[in-house]
Amino acid sequence: MYRHLEQLLARRVSEYLQGRYPGVTLPAIVVEQPPKVELGDFAIPLFPFAKPLRSAPLKIAEVVRTEIGPIEGIAGMQVAPPGYLNVRIDRSWLAAALAADQKPAAEILAGKMLVEHSSINPNKAAHIGHLRNAILGDTFVRLLRYAGREVDVQNYIDNTGVQVADVVVGFIHIEKKSRAEIEELARQPRFDYYCWDVYAQASRWYEEDKKNLTVRAATLHAIEAGNDETSDLAELISTAVLKRHLETMDRLDIEYDFLPRESEILRLHFWEAAFTKLKEKGVLSYVDAGKNAGCWVMDRPNKERDDRLEGPLREIAEDGTLDRLVEEEEIDLDDDSPADYESWGDNETASEDDLHANAKVIVRSNGTVGYVGKDIAYHMWKFGLLGRDFGYRKFFRYPNEHECWISTIDGEKDHPHFGDVVENYNVIDVRQSEAQNTVIEALRELGHGEAADHLTHFSYGMVVLTPQCAAELGYDLTDEEKSRPWIGVSGRKGFGVKADDLLDQLILSAKKEVDGRHPQAGDDDRRQIATQIAIGALRYFMLKYTKPSVIAFDFKDALSFEGETGPYAQYAVVRATSIFRKAGLEAEGFLGSIGLDAADVAKYLSSADADEIWELWLAASKTSYVVAQCIAATEPAYLAKHAFQLAQLFNTFYHRHPILSEPDEKRKQFLLTTVAVVRRELIRALAVMGISVPPIM
RNA sequence: GGGCCCGUAGCUCAAACGGAUAGAGCAUCGGAUUUCUAAUCCGAGGGUUGCAGGUUCGAUUCCUGCCGGGCCUACCA
């Protein structure tokens, strides 16, 4: 409702000013929230109007106040120095609307949206870095759905990459496992943990002897080609690990609709289709000299030519002898530790007259396409611009019957329609900004500016470990690492906190609390409650930081159930529920059963000491407003903050106003209504964050 | 070298478009009539918003330059 009033107010003030001062170009009306409730519920700064209207902000405010006339839901306006128009909401009007759960007619928003998130390499267990991704992505999906949008959730599976090859190498060449043995292992409940170690082992094996890298190259080649023992094994392993990822994420109520796999992007020739179009439109150009000779590249015209080619490097470059070291570690994007490659300048090769020195290589000189190329093809498909489609088959059925589909070559006849979306969000950490921009740029240069404008890189910072946390996990740190502010998670080194482990630990710790508090409850119930609390704690923890911030993971913070945490907000709801239970009332149906008298509500919300209760109502009215903000800014943290503030206001209210012992029956009804409204809105906000509330805590 | 991000209380973080007295949590210290369960509430201390300039009615926010940190910058994925 708050959002509705805000929009109405902005429109009316704008219309009024346009009418009063015809022909003057006016800035847009900005509606803010005053720092204190006493000042009002909306604030409109009029400073920007001073110049075009050649009048003092205070005067303009005064004119608007006296002349604008009545607005539904607005009680009055006040002029405040140095130039604000403060607006008060009609409290009983808003209370009635909220109690009746009235919603303004929803805007009709056509077109399907797509959120891509998780995209974990299927070669090892998911870790805390993946949790942040999946929780951000899933919450964003819930935000969009709350706002009435139709959303498909996709999880891109790179099942043909180096990371999978490494695990295959580990199983065959280091562990010397037979196919039957691997099949047996893949049936184990935490096969992904096993792979975690195998992957780390393989990485060490390469380090021991660089010649082992030839084994990896051969394995990778076999996987890409398909149709042999090695690629079958890769398929077996990656599919088993993928299932584990789905199970892990399902523990957090995170579900996917479709899993497009790189193997199908390759085998259904998505790239070839994209390549043709990219060449036609001249997006790619062939390089016949210089360091990128033989490649198809995409020029990046808006980038400055790289200055690292200046100075002494030129001389090194001129004889062309110095090649980039090929053994450098490739980046595993599931990996939050930087690959330690040489600093710039030591090993640079480039020619001064190389026209494409700054270009992005899309097709290598050996004719194979790189990751960005595949991604361009995939994104053309997403927007329905490729002219090809995947085959589809059912892959994973969630306990709630929801079906998750996977790409395949020959699919089932009947399947949902994926792709052809009007808007796409890719939840990928900030390190991929460059690659994402290249994809967006490619779409634009193909002439699909519309699609490019609707492709958003939902970027966020990494999750890293504090040195202390790393020490707790039993990792030996070098002195250099100890001196760093944080240590990157590294799948390759087997270095990190696994998602399932963290969740287990949270459940265990919540269970202890619940056991102590509710010894009379059954063990299954206690476990269920502990699980809800653990999920609440974890999801809130990952959502409370704004996207750009790097989360330095620490068990102490993550395992906390007090203060600004998920359980704090859950607890507020439990308290609200408990009031109704004690009163012998049904919390859910209460608002439907009560008829509040407008005059009474006005009385209780307008008395001298009512601001504090009003503040609670006001906060409760903001759910849709905050959701809209989160979507516009692609920032779920606003919702976390909102839920916390609402819970905080409720707790203060709870402490100050005994309800069941309230002698004035009408006031008691009013207070109960307040509780019911806040409870409903808090449950909603938490649900959008994927947090459910236990019956007792 | 270039691009992007960050620097706010002891610690971890907020502060939408430039706005009113820069707010929370944790930690520390001191309290809460044994009441709708204290996973709560109240209070206290704690700040030259990295530094220096600039733009203007007004700057944590925008611009420039420094200082410090991070990420990206491969024919890898």
Image: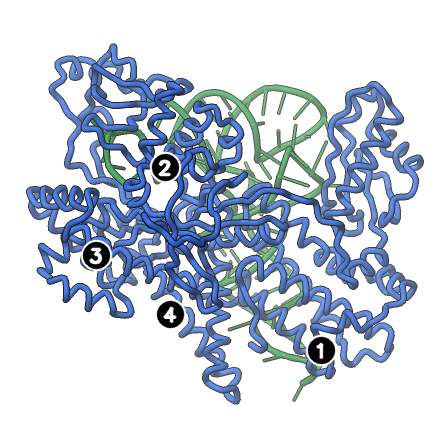
Q: Which of A641 and A56 is in front in this view?
A: A641
- Which chain is disc 2 placed on? A
- Tell me whether marks 1 and 4 sit on the same chain: yes
Residue of label 2: A375
Asked if the residue at tag 3 contacts the one at tag 1, i.e. Cβ–Cβ closer than 8 Å, the answer is no
Residue of label 4: A504
Q: Which of A470 and A322 is in front in this view?
A: A322
Residue of label 3: A476
- Tell me whether marks 4 and 3 sit on the same chain: yes
Discs 2/4, front: 2
Discs 4/3, front: 4
How far apart marks 1 and 4 lie (CA) works out to: 34 Å
Discs 2/1, front: 2
Q: Which amino acid does label 4 sit on?
A: Asp
Q: Which chain is blue?
A: A
Q: Which residue is drawn at 14% across and 66% down?
A: A181
- Which chain is disc 1 placed on? A
Where does the C terminus of chain A fall, quadrant-wise? bottom right
Residue A180 pos. (x, y %): 14, 66
Secondary structure beneath dot 3 equals: loop
Secondary structure beneath dot 4 equals: helix
Other residues around mark 3 within 10 Å, as few (<14) / some (14–19) / many (≥20): few
